[in-house]
Amino acid sequence: MKIASYEASTLLIPEDDPLADMPEEVGRKRPIVILRLRTDSGIEGIGVTFYGGAMTGSLRVAAEELAALTVGEDPMRIEHIVAKLNNGTGDSCGPGGLYQLALSAIDVALWDIKGKALGQPLWKLLGGHRDRVPTYASGSLRRGLTDDQAQKAAAILVRKGFKEMKTQMALPGNPTIADEIRRVRVVREAIGPDIRLMCDINQRWRPEQAIDIGSRIEDVGLFWLEDVTRADDFQGLARITAALKTPIAGGEYVYGIEPFRQMIQMHSVDIPMIDICRAGGVTPWMKIAGMAEAFNLPVVSHVMPEILCHLIAACPNGLTVEYMPWMLCLYEETPAIEDGMMVLPDKPGLGLTFDEKAIAAFRA
Ligand SMILES: [Mg+2]
């Protein structure tokens, strides 16, 4: 079996909030790139990547230029192909930036092909630790909502059966410490003590602010506090992690494998969060998860639950899947949630089929 052809497209998908229906800005669109790799035996593997923003057109071209190097290669030899792509870009275009994001789409598509060729779902190919995984509602309880809206949205998520959900602090404007603390407390009030609650800062605090505010909310019982300061300040993160009882999660902004070694060795986080696009695909994602396992750390996923559920289910230290529903609209069907858990599909590969009508409508 050989890779015969490829096709990449730029799409503009709606930035809505399908979980609680409180979108930040009605009508706003998110640019993404989808990739199809086709083999001479008729198998099509799919990949999705983004974070290109205004450079999404360049990201599509980067994916096409890398995909061109896969033509004629055996899709089962993924490490061989990745080495060829590295070599083809002079071994110095990555890791990091557009190269890594484009590589990710290719690697994901290759794993999809491998699963389809072997007739096995990806989560089983990668280890098959569990056939259902915990998941948390994400993207609804944002910092831009009023307290009242946040409480209403939280109640909707509980009614929908979510047992875990994430909110945000580092409120817009010039919030006082009291404002920040009030927000996380009103969300906790709305959901009760038994729902797992995470809170994302998205790199917006200074280390001393994180320690100050974080220590005042320890009684809220957060499951984790995420990206409390700049993602590349591994030492600052380590100070915060040492100072707070609440577990610190982070890593979604980190590119490639090696920086995770630094983060883990410096005890920068309690819970590494691995983004598949920035990691560079399934292959490096699983290596980072294995590295964390050796340090007795759990790992969590970032966005694209329809793909990342496979990876969290595969590894023994996978903790929970971020149910960020941004990309669900791309597919005919996505994994079900039962009793707060994502149910892994039996279909081969990713188990996902593009909804061609939707794709046509989103085409940029
Ligand atoms: Mg985050």
Image (tube, rainbow, N blue to C red):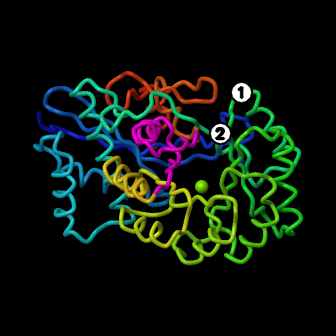
User: For the point 19% across and 39% down, which residue is it?
Assistant: 5
| Amino acid type of the residue tagged 2 in the rendering | Ala
The x, y position of residue 183, in whole percent, is 84, 54
Q: Residue at x 36, y 22 (%)?
A: 347
Relative to residue 275, is residue 352 depicted above or below?
above
Question: Magenta span covers which residues?
Answer: 296-323
Locate the N terminus by quadrant.
top left
* Residue tagged 2: 137
Q: Is residue 239 left or right of residue 77?
A: right
Q: Does the residue at mark 2 contact the one at mark 1 (Cβ under 8 Å)?
A: yes
Q: Residue at x 55, y 78 (%)?
A: 235
Q: CA distance from mark 2 to mark 1?
A: 10 Å
Residue 91 percent coordinates (x, y): 21, 69
Which quadrant of the picture is home to ligand 1? bottom right
Does dot 1 land on a helix, a strand or a loop?
Answer: loop
Q: Position of residue 326 (x, y in %)?
A: 56, 40
Q: Is residue 357 above or below residue 88?
A: above
**Magenta stretch contains residue 298:** yes
- Quarter of the image for residue 128 reads top left
**CB at mark 2 closer than 8 A to ligand 1?**
no
Foreground of the two, 262 or 96:
262
Q: Quadrant of residue 199?
A: bottom right
In screen coordinates, is 196 left or right of 53? right
Find out whether residue 312 is within the magenta segment.
yes
Query: Which tag, 2 or 1, sits closer to the chain's start?
Result: 2
Numbered disc 2: secondary structure: strand
